Amino acid sequence: MVLSNPQTVADSKRRFYAAYPHVIPGLYRRVVDELLVELHLLAGQAGFQADSLFAMGLTQVFDNLMQGFKPAERQKELFAAICSGAGLKADQLRKDAKQLREHLVPHGEAEIKSWIEQQGQGAPDVLKHVLQQAGRSDFHYSRLHAVGLMGLLQDLSGGDDQDPQALQERAHQLGHSMGLQKDKLQKDMGLYASNLEKMSQAVELLEETVAAERRKREQRQGEPASAATGQVSEPAS
């Protein structure tokens, strides 16, 4: 998917708010704003294409950083609006990420690494396409490619319960085999992991605060009833 970008950041944001006319909780507003600006800037790069690895990275960033977003049923609408701001189709990105995962995960990390080192020889078409894009002289790297690599390796290893440092190192090696700059990969993966941890802590703190306020409210509501129950009527003379 090739992007073209004749519009300004303000244009992208107007398209977003037209597609998503709802209040965004403060905790998530910055994430949304950063994604809107990032996708807008990417859309202006002549060598950028939204390939399957990028799609996996973008969906991974959104899904992970939007954990705890309420109302949950609006997450799909929100993602679609973010994508539409840059002229991307959310459903197609989800489909591309799913295809990459489904075609690669059954083969295992060692076989995928071998395909990459052999420049895609014998690999599924979806991986061949990613490698072809990465090998172009005008290829434009995005941090979302790095996140996509981490997401793919997580799936290959069976989930999120892994050593973050070991996961990043494996992703560095895989990305380097693809021709991606290792220093950029290292920086982007480290920053993403840090942001993910901070967001997780913020969501946990928010949930604890909301729960504490709910308990206080319930306690206040229960106090009048308790006071009324505790009153003893004086006997009539």
Image (cartoon, helix red, strand yellow):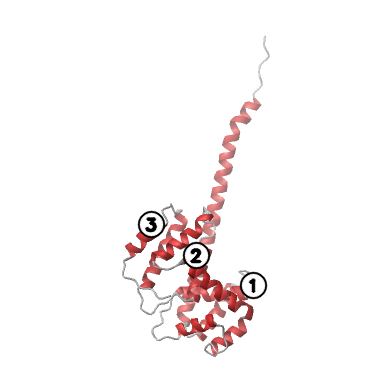
State the count of labels: 3
On the image, numbered disc 2 is attached to which residue? 62
Q: Looking at the rendered structure, which numbered label has been put on residue 158? A: 1
Q: If the image is split into quadrants, where does the C terminus sit? A: top right
Q: According to the image, label 3 marks what residue?
A: 18
Q: Nearer the viewer, residue 77 or 169?
A: 77
Indicate the position of residue 224 as horizontal and vertical percent values. Answer: 59, 30
Q: Mark 2 or mark 1: which comes first in sequence? A: 2
| Pointers 2 and 3 in contact (C-beta within 8 Å) | no
| Residue 165 percent location from the top left of the image | 57, 75
Distance, label 2 to label 3, CA atoms, is 20 Å
- Is 80 located above or below residue 141 in the figure? above
Q: Quadrant of residue 223?
A: top right
How far across and down, in percent of the image, does residue 194 sit?
50, 68
Disc 2 and disc 1 in contact, CB within 8 angstroms: no
Query: As displayed, is residue 124 above or below residue 97?
Result: below
Q: Nearer the viewer, residue 133 or 124?
A: 124
Amino acid at pointer 3: Ala
Q: Is residue 141 above or below residue 226?
A: below
Horizontal relation, residue 109 to residue 76: left or right: right
Q: CA distance from mark 2 to mark 1?
A: 20 Å
